[in-house]
């Protein structure tokens, strides 16, 4: 159930039970330095991500979609009326992708282990082969988009998407994703997307990736 303040018709967090809310960053804005700088994280989380969440909520406000889980809506984009599908795809995708992205990073030092590491090594010519293929996907995504490690059936696969498109809309389960929009790196790295990708490996939360891999394959 979704309620709005009667007269202003403005979204009020206290009255919202099932619309998307912006997840708090699970660490401080400066926690990923020097790899991801504080200023970038503040703008990325506080402005860009908050914007996707607010615009998604505005798009589904007053419709049955407001009562559904965001990822459930993204998995069935064809079921969204055409006049709101673009807004749902872009802003819902942005809300979902970023909520996951914050959790795919950590200031803690983690590394891939166990079944996840075995699968990565078997699928991609070793862990270095995986990193190289993932970087290539991130570099070759023209313009704004994301690079992904997804579970497709039982298999691991690397892919990229444009804009805020989610692999969930293609029936795939993202277990790791890298935002390659310029807003994610330009302030610190300028046009050097490759340097950003190389630095990002230092903050990947492999424990989270392993958890998602296990969920997706069990
Ligand atoms: Mn972003």
Image (cartoon, helix red, strand yellow):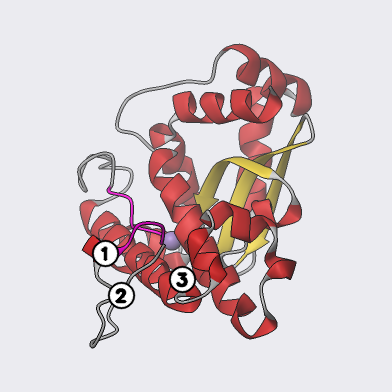
Q: Position of residue 30 (x, y in %)?
A: 20, 45
- Circle 2 crowding by C-alpha within 10 Å: few under 14, some 14–19, many from 20: some
Q: Is 154 on the left or on the right of 217, as rendered?
A: right
Seen at 45% across and 66% down, the residue is: 182
Q: Please indicate, yes or no, whether residue 192 appears anywhere in the rendered image.
A: no
| Front residue of 25 and 71 | 71
Seen at 27% across and 48% down, the residue is: 24
Mark 3 or mark 2, earlier in chain: 2
- Circle 1 crowding by C-alpha within 10 Å: few under 14, some 14–19, many from 20: few
Q: CA distance from mark 3 to mark 2?
A: 15 Å
Residue under pointer 1? 15
- Decide: is 110 above or below 18: above
- Decide: is 121 above or below 32: above
Q: Position of residue 72 (x, y in %)?
A: 61, 53
Mark 2 or mark 1, earlier in chain: 2
Residue under pointer 2? 4
Which quadrant does the C terminus fall into?
top right
Instruction: Find ligand 1 in the image and state its quadrant.
Output: bottom left
| Region rendered in magenta | 15-24
Q: Is 28 on the left or on the right of 193, as rendered?
A: left
Q: Position of residue 115 (x, y in %)?
A: 64, 14
Seen at 48% across and 42% down, the residue is: 198
The circle drawn on residue 166 is none
């Amino acid at each position: 159930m979704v309620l709005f303040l009667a007269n202003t018709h403005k979204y009020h967090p206290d009255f919202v039970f099932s619309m998307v809310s912006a997840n708090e960053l699970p660490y401080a804005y400066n926690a990923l330095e020097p790899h991801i700088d504080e200023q970038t994280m503040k703008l990325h989380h506080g402005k860009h991500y908050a914007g996707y969440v607010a615009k998604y909520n505005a798009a589904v406000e007053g419709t049955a979609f407001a009562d559904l889980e965001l990822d459930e809506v993204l998995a069935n984009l064809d079921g969204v009326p055409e006049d709101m599908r673009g807004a749902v795809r872009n802003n819902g995708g942005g809300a979902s992708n970023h909520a996951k992205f914050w959790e795919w990073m950590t200031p803690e030092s983690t590394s891939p282990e166990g079944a996840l590491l075995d699968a990565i090594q078997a699928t991609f010519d070793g862990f270095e082969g995986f990193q190289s293929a993932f970087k290539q996907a991130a570099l070759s995504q023209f313009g704004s988009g994301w690079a992904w490690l997804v579970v497709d059936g039982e298999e691991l696969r690397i892919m990229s998407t444009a804009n805020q498109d989610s692999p969930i809309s293609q029936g795939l389960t993202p277990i790791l994703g890298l935002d390659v929009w310029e807003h994610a790196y330009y302030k610190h790295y300028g046009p050097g997307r490759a340097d950003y990708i190389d630095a990002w490996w230092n903050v990947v939360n492999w424990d989270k990736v392993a958890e998602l891999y296990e969920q997706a394959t069990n």
